[in-house]
Amino acid sequence: MSILPGPLRTAPHRRFDPLQGRWLVVSPQRLERPWQGQEEEAAPEELPAHDPACYLCPGNERAAGRRNPAYDGTFVFDNDFAALLPDIEPVSVQHRGLLVARSERGVCRVLCFSPRHDLRLARMDPASLRRVVDVWAEQYEELGARDDIAHVQVFENRGAMMGASNAHPHGQLWAQEHIPDEVVREDERQQGYQGRGGTCLLCDYLAVELVEEERLVVSNDAFVALVPFWAVWPFETLVLPRCHVGSISRLDGRQRDGLADILRRLTRGYDALFGVPFPYSMGVHQSPTDGRDHRAWHLHAHFYPPLLRSASVRKFMVGYELLGQPQRDVTAEAAAERLRASTL
Ligand code: H2U
Ligand code: ZN
């Protein structure tokens, strides 16, 4: 069942992103070429279980000279080259509203998902993935409880194409004094929606998608992954808990297992789509920790993969997208269909 009028599957149109409050241009007519799938991709790389040259493997020395313990599960450490620092002098400048700056305190950490150099989320077993979910929850709780931290961003860059510096399975945590802009916008949009109708934007959105079905990718009792109606990246997905909850730390054990299961099936689906370790940036958006009322916030994760048609055809945000607004060729419906087939 779909409410989408036929021309919106074949002709240029605009779609609205209610979470960011912005429009994008969708140009399905540009994808008349047949799906070429697995043609041009590189062969999957063979990695050793332990790489003596890896900065993140257990027991190895890191770039700045510290040595990793012989960890056998997950491992968290303060980033040796942190973008944000906790102990800096507070200063600010405000010159005629034109030169505006202020110091920003924060903490950056690296989280190794596994001691095994050759694994990635898609290849980890459910119990190990569940451990990663638990560490995300612990870190959010610990950092978010601090007075100098208003927001904790959990993310993963996967693949050199997305800027990952190392093949070892790892993600990052950036916690800071102010709420970053993407999150401020999502917060305002969720609060505004709840203020107008009394219900949650993402609870309502998920209910619509569960009826529409065509943008769903994988689901279980606790979580759903779908290609959002307003997706900008070719195979972008949104991971949503079925219940209204603001952070991973508020999920019970069954729900955390549910999240781990979705992450596993979704990333395996991504790998299967092109037959290679699929590059992406992934981030978990949890309610800000600035002490204000964020009851409207609905926990979710975004996956932003750049690959469009094969390992050698990727999306860049350039030209019109840099100067006007985002644009995509493959519709959310077509992307969901391909991704869903890859997760079977
Ligand atoms: P990315 O792969 O997403 O770049 O994350 C790796 C992070 O690990 C990166 O932020 C840090 C880099 O600063 N790092 C260390 O803290 N110590 C090292 O020895 C190597 C990399
Ligand atoms: Zn390694």
Image (cartoon, helix red, strand yellow):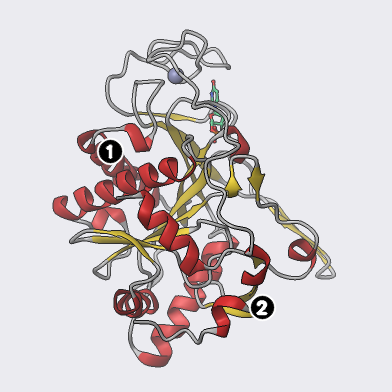
Query: Quarter-wise, where is residue 301 in the image?
Result: bottom left
Q: Position of residue 156 (x, y in %)?
A: 48, 42
Say which amino acid is labelled 2: Pro
Please report contact status of discs 1 and 2: CB closer than 8 Å, yes or no: no
Numbered label attached to residue 30: none
Q: Specify few, some or many for label 2: CA neighbours under 10 Å numbering under 14, 14-19, or 20 or more.
A: some
Q: In the rendered view, does 286 fall on the left or right side of 308?
A: left
Judge the density around disc 1: few (<14), some (14-19), many (≥20) Cα neighbours within 10 Å.
many
For marks 1 and 2, give the CA distance. Answer: 40 Å
| Number of disc labels | 2
Residue drawn at point x = 52 percent, y = 30 percent? 79
Q: Nearer the viewer, residue 183 or 333?
A: 333
Q: Is residue 307 visible?
A: no
Disc 1 residue type (three-letter): Leu
Q: Please give the residue where the numbered disc 1 appears in the rendered image.
A: 129
| Disc 2 C-beta below 8 A from ligand 1 | no
Q: Is residue 272 above or below residue 75?
A: below
Which quarter is ligand 1 in? Answer: top right
Farthest residue toward the bottom?
196
Q: Is residue 210 above or below residue 197?
A: above
Residue 80 in view, yes or no: yes
Identify the image quadrant of residue 98: bottom right
Which disc, if any, is residue 12?
2
